[in-house]
Image (cartoon, rainbow, N blue to C red):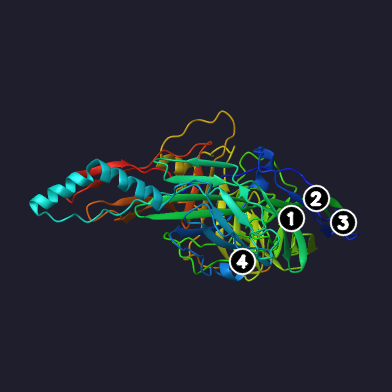
């Protein structure tokens, strides 16, 4: 199981470009643009702050230019005029796409005496302290000079940004954006830099939008090389109100994948092969209906952690019926039309589950009723992810004839003791399906089994990253349909750390220890 750490900002309501409006039929609404206050850290603002970034990564060396990445143009095709000189020895040039436009930028540094200059200073000091004596010694003994050791690349904080806000290809007229914070770690050869919110006008299919984003970059040196990575996160969202069957709903629309559009749907990316076989779904934009902003168990990166969260997709299930969802590319208009699609059901022995499935009709989040059954349009569906929630539920007593362990019972017995809960705390299992998952056929009015869940079995992965005499062990818990567990909590706590022992064929212990989370 892996744990991801995210650095996030906050949010504040700001007057947007488009006013709120609701059509007479109650199935369409206009959504107002609002911007994120990145200085806030309120829990109630979490869903607005939690977005999936655009990433970039580049080596820091002489003459680096970004090449073509995905559908991005080259830097030289976007920026025609640059400042004559930058302060950094190795400025980093790049291109990012927001909406329908590509913007060029250059990351610079305020640090003086960087890169090779620091290396020359170190060499000069070494020469002064012992270089002459070493040379005389070699002359007297006939010893050959040793080859120089590889230089250690010294990185600097990239804390100055030239960004082509007006999209005219000229960086010389742009005001430099200074970083709001910079931190260093270890031997000061690793720097993390955050910039303030950057407001920029963009176009999305001919619609203009006052967009905003944040930028965080890290630079680190390793041996003779330096590397720079960056994350661009959306800092806007849209909000409005829609009436369905006479009931008003608050709706919030998030540019979750931070590309300037609000209509991106998820898709399985078969070109990305995960080491453990998990299916990889490209991040989609996010819709909240009547969001619970103070939900304690909320994970905005996982729609199965709340009933109010949906991926922007063709269909959503709301108020016990299916709706066809349409979102404009700029996110200014949202429409929900009641669907007349034929419906069947899927079931699972584990009650209280939320799952994301996908098929010809796109992605769809479903939730079971008390019997463990959920409605689903007819057709072929595959599991993408799920969450089993047993929070606050008492474990029923088992009879001798019951052989199948429950989720809570199996986890408690197999993975170690837990603390008794004084009040209901999270008892959950989350997992992601693998490419091995077989499609389930749903027929009208009938119920098909959607397999997943316990019993869970451990799977140990062995790698040799440091040579034949050392190994790296990783452990995952695998469900009954080969899904890989991604999170577990029992009464709010992680299960005890599983232990391992490595022994020879004759039983002699070579090594033992515990698996660590992470």
Question: Which residue has dot 1 on it?
Answer: 318
Mark toward the start of the polypeptide (1 vs 4): 4
Marks 1 and 4, how far apart at CA: 47 Å
**Distance in Å between CA atoms under marks 3 and 4:** 42 Å
Residues at marks 1 and 2 touching, judged by CB atoms closer than 8 Å: yes
Disc 1, SS: strand
Residue on which the image places disc 2: 249
Whether residue 6 is visible to the viewer of this picture, yes or no, is: no
Residue found farthest to the top:
422
Q: Closer to us: mark 3 or mark 1?
A: 3
The answer to whether 252 appears left or right of 485 in the picture is: right
Chain-order first, disc 2 or disc 4: 4
- Left or right, 32 with respect to 142, comes to right
What residue sits right under mark 3 in the picture?
22
In this rendering, the answer to whether 475 lies above or below 208 is above
Of marks 1 and 4, the one in the foreground: 4
Image coordinates of residue 247 in percent, x first then y, are 84, 51
Proximity of marks 3 and 1: CB atoms separated by less than 8 Å = no
The answer for how far apart the CA atoms under marks 2 and 3 are is 11 Å
Separation (CA) of disc 1 from disc 2: 11 Å
x then y, percent, for residue 280: 52, 62
């Amino acid at each position: 199981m892996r744990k991801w750490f995210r650095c996030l900002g906050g949010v504040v309501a700001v007057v947007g470009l488009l006013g709120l409006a609701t059509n007479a039929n109650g199935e369409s609404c206009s959504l107002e643009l609002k911007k994120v206050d990145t200085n806030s850290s309120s829990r109630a603002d979490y869903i607005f702050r939690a977005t999936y970034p655009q990433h970039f990564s580049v080596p820091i060396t002489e003459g680096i230019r970004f090449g073509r990445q995905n559908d991005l143009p080259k830097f030289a095709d976007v920026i025609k005029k640059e400042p004559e000189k930058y302060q950094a020895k190795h400025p980093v040039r790049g291109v990012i796409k927001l909406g329908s436009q590509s913007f060029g930028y250059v990351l610079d540094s305020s640090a003086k005496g960087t890169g090779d200059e620091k290396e020359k200073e170190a060499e000069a000091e070494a020469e002064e302290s012992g270089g002459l004596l070493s040379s005389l010694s070699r002359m007297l003994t006939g010893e050959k000079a040793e080859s120089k050791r590889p230089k250690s690349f010294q990185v600097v904080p990239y804390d100055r940004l030239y960004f082509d806000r007006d999209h005219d290809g000229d960086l010389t007229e742009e005001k430099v954006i200074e970083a709001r914070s910079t931190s260093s770690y270890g031997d000061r050869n690793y720097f993390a830099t955050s910039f303030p919110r950057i407001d920029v006008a963009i176009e999305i299919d001919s619609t203009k939008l006052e967009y905003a984003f944040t930028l965080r970059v890290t630079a680190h040196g390793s041996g003779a090389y330096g590397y720079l990575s960056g994350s661009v996160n959306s800092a806007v969202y849209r909000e409005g109100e829609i009436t369905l069957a006479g009931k008003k709903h608050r709706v919030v629309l998030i540019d979750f994948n931070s590309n300037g559009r609000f209509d991106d749907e998820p898709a399985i990316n078969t070109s990305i092969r995960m080491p453990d076989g998990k299916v990889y779904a490209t991040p989609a934009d996010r819709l909240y209906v009547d969001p619970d902003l103070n939900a304690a168990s909320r994970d905005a990166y996982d729609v199965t952690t709340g009933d109010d969260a949906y991926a922007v997709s063709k269909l959503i299930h709301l108020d016990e019926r299916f709706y066809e969802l349409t979102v404009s590319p700029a996110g200014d208009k949202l429409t929900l039309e009641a669907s007349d699609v034929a419906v069947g059901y899927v079931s699972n022995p584990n009650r209280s589950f939320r799952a994301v499935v996908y098929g010809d009709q796109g992605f769809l989040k479903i939730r079971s009723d008390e019997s463990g059954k959920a409605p689903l349009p007819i057709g072929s569906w595959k599991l993408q992810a799920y969450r089993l929630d047993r929070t606050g539920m008492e474990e029923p007593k088992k009879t001798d004839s019951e052989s199948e362990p429950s989720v809570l019972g199996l986890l408690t017995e197999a993975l170690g003791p837990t603390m008794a809960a004084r009040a209901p705390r999270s008892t959950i299992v989350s997992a992601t399906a693998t490419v091995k998952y077989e499609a389930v056929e749903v027929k009208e009015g009938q119920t098909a089994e959607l397999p997943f869940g316990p019993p869970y079995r451990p799977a140990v992965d062995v790698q040799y990253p440091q040579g034949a005499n050392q190994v790296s062990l990783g452990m995952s818990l695998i469900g009954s349909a080969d899904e890989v567990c991604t999170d577990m909590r029992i009464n709010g706590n992680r299960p005890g750390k599983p232990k391992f022992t490595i022994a020879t064929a004759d039983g002699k212990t070579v090594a033992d220890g515990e698996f660590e989370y992470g």
